[in-house]
Image: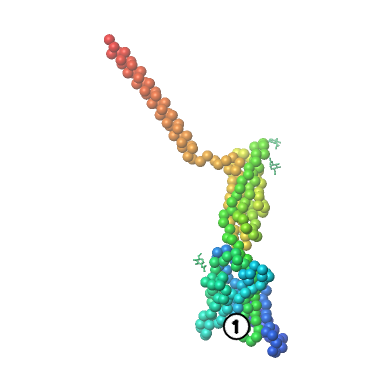
Amino acid sequence: MAGAPQAFLLFLLLLSQPRDTSPATLFCSPKRVNGILGESVILPLDSGMMFKSITWSAPSPRQDAASGTTVPLAVVTPGGPGGLPRLVVEDERYRGRVRLYGRTYSLEISNLTMTDEGKYEAEKNLIGHSKYSCGYPLSIYKRLSEPEIRVHPVMAGNGTCNVTFTCSAGERARHLTYTWTRPAGGAVLSTEESLLVQHRLGDEDSPITCTATNPVSNSSASASPKVACEGPTPPQAPALSYCRAKGILVLGVLGTLLAGILTVHVLAAREQTRP
Ligand SMILES: *[C@@H]1O[C@H](CO)[C@@H](O)[C@H](O)[C@H]1NC(C)=O
Ligand SMILES: *[C@@H]1O[C@H](CO)[C@@H](O)[C@H](O)[C@H]1NC(C)=O
Ligand SMILES: *[C@@H]1O[C@H](CO)[C@@H](O)[C@H](O)[C@H]1NC(C)=O
Ligand SMILES: *[C@@H]1O[C@H](CO)[C@@H](O)[C@H](O)[C@H]1NC(C)=O
């Protein structure tokens, strides 16, 4: 477990520590965490080492505060023997949105908003006078919805069509990348936002797929060069109505013929009955 080397480091630190000085603080390397807008995130803290209390800090809400400035968020104290630890939330912004995750001292924040971004901190006050401190730079991203593909076909002469596809997964999209593949999930054609495809009129269709990816999600959409250049293939409905139109025409012709024949017969009959 990761607790063992930490405990060992702390032991060394305590040994090298002259008595009655200011408390020693052991820092862990910052743990970058990505959260999804509207969902939850866990700031991991391992439960090794006995402690008196854990103080969680949140990014300062003040716009003019220097980046990395924190304010108290919550305090965790161990429960009695066999009891659950106590969590007291001090920051209004997080009331009802934080809890300890499972049976650890990790902090879970739910219903994330963009304003939750920034640097969090956990400071464990250990038995004795030392502290263990961890920083958590938190970034929040949107879960990507299906990208939109815009199409711009240009006839290049000689029966070829140059079609430019442009993929877009919404504005305010940070750390967003696009990947064009054909077939879906197959060979990568491009990692730009736009893709130029040459399509020979009459050739087989070969759809392309755009996948938008950000640090928390990915989403794909496909488009067809053939449809972009030649228009949608006629669906079944017009063919049906064409058949129906033909049927009606045939019926009409038959009807007229029948009427004609009848008229001729009736006229002939009248001629015969005339004296
Ligand atoms: C968090 O979101 C859920 C569902 O979106 C909602 O029911 C709940 O009231 C929200 N809680 C807080 C504290 O905003
Ligand atoms: C079509 O694309 C080809 C290959 O990129 C290019 O050489 C040609 O100039 C383009 N034609 C038109 C009309 O855009
Ligand atoms: C058009 O196609 C013909 C025959 O396929 C070829 O000889 C000619 O070079 C082509 N012209 C252009 C501009 O691509
Ligand atoms: C896309 O997201 C799925 C889960 O939604 C994941 O399993 C997959 O590895 C991701 N693919 C890429 C290329 O990031």
Give me the residue at 69% from left, 89% from top. Answer: 20
Q: How many marks?
A: 1
Q: Quadrant of ligand 3?
A: top right
Where is 267 relative to 231, above or below? above
Q: What residue type is labelled 1?
A: Phe
Residue furthest bottom as drawn:
19
In what quadrant of the picture does the N terminus appear?
Answer: bottom right
- The residue sitting at 58% across, 58% down in the picture is 144
Tell me: is circle 1 under 8 Å from ligand 1.
no
Q: What residue is shown with label 1?
A: 51
| Nearer-the-camera pick, 133 or 70 | 70
Q: How crowded is mark 1: few (under 14 residues within 10 Å), some or many (20 or more)?
A: some
Position in image of residue 245 (x %, y %): 45, 32
Position of residue 268 measured from the top left corner of the image (x, y, whole percent): 33, 15
Q: Report if residue 187 is visible in the image.
A: no
Q: Dot 1 lies on which element?
A: strand
| Position in image of residue 3 (x %, y %) | 62, 79
Where residue 165 appears, as percent x and y from the top left, is 63, 47
The residue sitting at 60% across, 78% down in the picture is 55
Q: Is residue 182 left or right of residue 243?
A: right
Quarter of the image for the C terminus: give it: top left
